[in-house]
């Protein structure tokens, strides 16, 4: 099955392409399912510098719902998890098709924060990253977890990174939350998908899906051949959607 569930348009503020342009690209590439997953804004403006305005959510959702193609188009959000917004996440989940979890920032006890992509994570930050990611998976809101190894764009793989990787992988297995092998990181050579992380995942037979995490229409299909080669080389079994409402996954045929 050709599908992508992690797609960003111009709505996210740091991407490009309209909803209909992505749908046209998906149709040209023979996709059977296309899911849109803009970065979820928050009612209080949290993380607003890297999210669409809260006031744009209704138009984004309408644009996705009104797009008609001879394949399935799904509406979703990619969400940073904070427990105080559980009620908000619940309301979102009731009106969209799915939510993706993704840890983009860590918040330290002293009140400071950092992007996991900034290149300045410390060993103690890794523990916060792991705790944030695992709590998000435990929340039950998310159909899968995006770029779980993104912290390795800012941190070398050492004993601390290995311990964090194993904790996230084992939580994924225990909670049956698939982890994503990310195409945006692959195309941009950002340090993820990390071979070291996914070797550990392969040893434990983690549930995994492939996503382009496209921020430009030309990147929607571009990474998949490389991602499949990456997964096959490590012996990772790949999932594809088995049900869209609610979203669930099965192993690809022949895997």
Image (tube, helix red, strand yellow):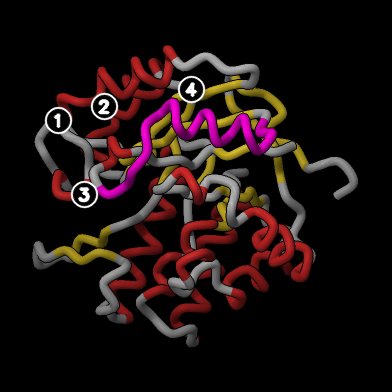
Q: Is residue 17 magenta?
A: yes
The magenta-colored residue range is 14-31
Taking 192 as reference, is 7 above or below it?
A: above
Q: Could you tell which of marks 4 and 3 lies nearer the N-terminus?
A: 3
Task: Determine which of the numbered discs, if any, sits on residue 97 in the image.
Answer: 4
Q: Is residue 71 visible?
A: yes
- Image quarter hosting the N terminus: top right
- Residue at 69% across, 57% down: 225
Q: Is residue 130 left or right of residue 240?
A: left
Characterize the local packing of mark 3: few (<14), some (14-19) or many (20 or more) Cα atoms within 10 angstroms. few
Q: Nearer the viewer, residue 211 or 236?
A: 211
Task: Determine which of the numbered discs, if any, sits on residue 202 in the image.
Answer: none
Q: Looking at the rendering, which quadrant does residue 203 occupy? A: bottom right
| Residue depth check, mark 4 versus mark 2: number of the one nearer the observer | 4
Q: CA distance from mark 2 to mark 3?
A: 19 Å
Task: Determine which of the numbered discs, if any, sits on residue 88 in the image.
Answer: 2
Q: Position of residue 195 (x, y in %)?
A: 61, 75
Q: Could you tell which of marks 1 and 4 lies nearer the N-terminus?
A: 1
Are circles 2 and 3 on residues that touch, CB within 8 Å? no
Characterize the local packing of mark 4: few (<14), some (14-19) or many (20 or more) Cα atoms within 10 angstroms. many
User: Residue extending furthest right?
Assistant: 254
Q: Position of residue 98 (x, y in %)?
A: 48, 28
| Residue depth check, mark 4 versus mark 3: number of the one nearer the observer | 3
Q: Could you tell which of marks 4 and 2 lies nearer the N-terminus?
A: 2
Mark 1, residue position? 43
């Amino acid at each position: 099955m050709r599908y992508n569930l992690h797609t960003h348009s111009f709505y996210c503020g740091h991407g490009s392409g309209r909803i209909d342009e992505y749908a046209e690209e998906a149709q040209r590439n023979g996709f059977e399912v296309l899911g849109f997953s803009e970065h979820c804004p928050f009612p209080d403006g949290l993380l607003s510098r890297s999210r669409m305005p809260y006031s744009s959510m209704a138009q984004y959702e309408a644009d996705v719902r009104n797009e008609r193609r001879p394949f399935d188009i799904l509406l979703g959000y990619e969400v940073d998890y904070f427990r105080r917004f559980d009620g908000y996440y619940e309301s979102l989940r009731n009106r969209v098709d799915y939510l993706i979890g993704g840890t983009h920032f860590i918040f330290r006890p002293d009140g400071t924060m950092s992007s996991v992509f900034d290149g300045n994570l410390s060993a103690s930050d890794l523990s916060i990253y792991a705790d944030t990611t695992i709590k998000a998976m435990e929340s039950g809101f998310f159909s899968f977890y995006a770029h779980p190894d993104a912290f390795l764009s800012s941190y070398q793989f050492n004993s601390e990174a290995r311990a964090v990787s194993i904790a996230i992988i084992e939580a994924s297995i225990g909670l049956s939350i698939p982890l994503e092998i990310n195409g945006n990181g692959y195309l941009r050579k950002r340090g993820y998908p990390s071979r070291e992380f996914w070797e550990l995942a392969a040893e434990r037979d983690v549930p995994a899906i492939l996503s382009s995490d496209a921020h430009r229409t030309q990147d929607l299909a571009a990474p998949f051949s490389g991602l499949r080669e990456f997964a096959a080389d490590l012996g990772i079994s790949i999932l594809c959607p088995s049900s869209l409402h609610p979203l669930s996954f099965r192993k690809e045929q022949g895997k």
